[in-house]
Amino acid sequence: MLPAARTFGEFIRIPIRFYQTIGEDLYEHRSPHRIRRLILKALLYIGFLNFNVLVLGEIIYFVKALNSFATVLEATGVAPCIGFSFVADFKQIALTVHRQTLREHLDQMEELFPKTVRQQAQYKLPQRERVMRRVMGVFTLLCLAYTTTFSVYPALKATVQYWLLGAPTFERNFGFAIWYPYNATGKTWVYWLTYMGQVHGAYLAGVAFLSADLILVASVTQLCMHFDYISRCLEDFAGASKKCAEEDIKYLQALVVRHAKCLELSEHVNSIFSFSLLLNFLTASLTICFIGFQVTASSTEDIVKYIIFLTASLVQVFVVCYYGDELMTASLRVGDAAYNQNWFECDTRYKRLLIILILRSQKPASIRAPTFPPISFNTYMKVISMSYQFFALLRTTYSDKGN
């Protein structure tokens, strides 16, 4: 029995489902269930209200901790959490601002998606999707492991110590250092209500941060798949000649139109994600720096949590840079494939179309952030280099003050 063809909904299912868990439904306009839409919208608004109150509490705690050298280590521990929260918040803001553009983008990607098993085999969809799923799986595991470890660990540790190891009291600690205008650990019900608010805020931040990048990964994966398909069609098309010029021209016209559509969709990706990518790369160096400092200066217990956080941050930047590099490489390959054809015996009109295709491919499709060059592996190396420079400066400053 032949396998069923994959649908676009299945291809992009992971980020869509994650968004729905926090109340964000990207296909809300297609849903006929009004009550469900209202419930999801209420969940989203309440969740982000709680999350932003927590971020405000983190900022106040950070400012207070900076006033004393004795608590500067605590301040550097809060800083990466604030950076992560800001990026998650602005990714959601960017999604809200560009919601209509994103919906149009997804609709056009769905229209371009290969529909039959035979087409999907020609596009090498199974291989592309397999790699994409693995990348999404690793990134998702690390991102949610970070938020879960920070938010759940204090209660889990206190439970084990109190119920299994016979500790005299249940330690009421929190996973994140946040200032509250009330005594958050005084009463049991207040503590647990506050604690659950932190857990939900951490999950919402993780999903908002993660899902935007997963949609970016899915979009770039499909665009690379189309660019590679166009390249293979151009390389394999050896029938171009003056004898069947009309058929050859129609064949090439279809590829030119598809190539132009892919370039248009790559610009959609930039218009939707450019602002969040800018903030992402601006904060990435400082975030990685502060996390690295915590790893070298914290207790063994905290080091494990911060190593997970550091790994997630490094992987996130690497994934974006990797797919940026893949998109540029795949789009440049189209021009090379067009030139490598047996074009010198073709009709003049065919040659003109081929020139247009080659000229368009000279400016590769890319992921860009405002004021930044196209994102590639060079961007990743610059982020790591800047992170190390900030880390060395912070480590030296802290050591000098300690002496």
Image: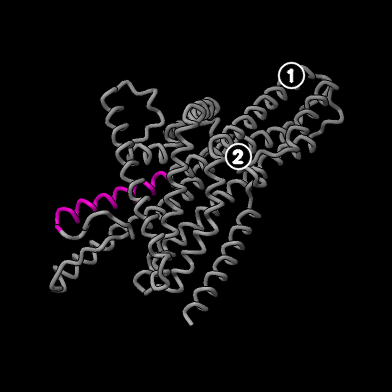
* Front: mark 1 or 2: 2
Please give the range of residues in magenta.
187-208
Q: In the displayed structure, would residue 141 be above or below residue 107?
A: below
Q: Is residue 49 above or below residue 310?
A: above
Residue at x 82%, y 25% (from the top left corner): 352
Q: Do the CB atoms of the residues marked 1 and 2 lie less than 8 Å apart?
A: no
Q: Residues within 10 Å of mark 2 (few under 14, many from 20)?
A: many
Residue under numbered circle 2: 224
Helix, strand, or loop for circle 2? Answer: helix
Q: Nearer the viewer, residue 328 or 93?
A: 93
Compare residues 275 and 183 and report the one nearer the observer: 183
Is residue 374 rendered to the left or right of residue 154? right
Amino acid type at mark 1: Glu
Above or below, 369 relative to 189: above
Q: How many marks?
A: 2
Q: Quadrant of residue 386 in the image?
A: bottom right
Residue 109 colored in magenta in the image: no
Give the residue number, with chain letter if any, for mark 1: 247
Whether 191 is among the magenta residues is: yes
> Where residue 334 sits: x, y (%)?
71, 37
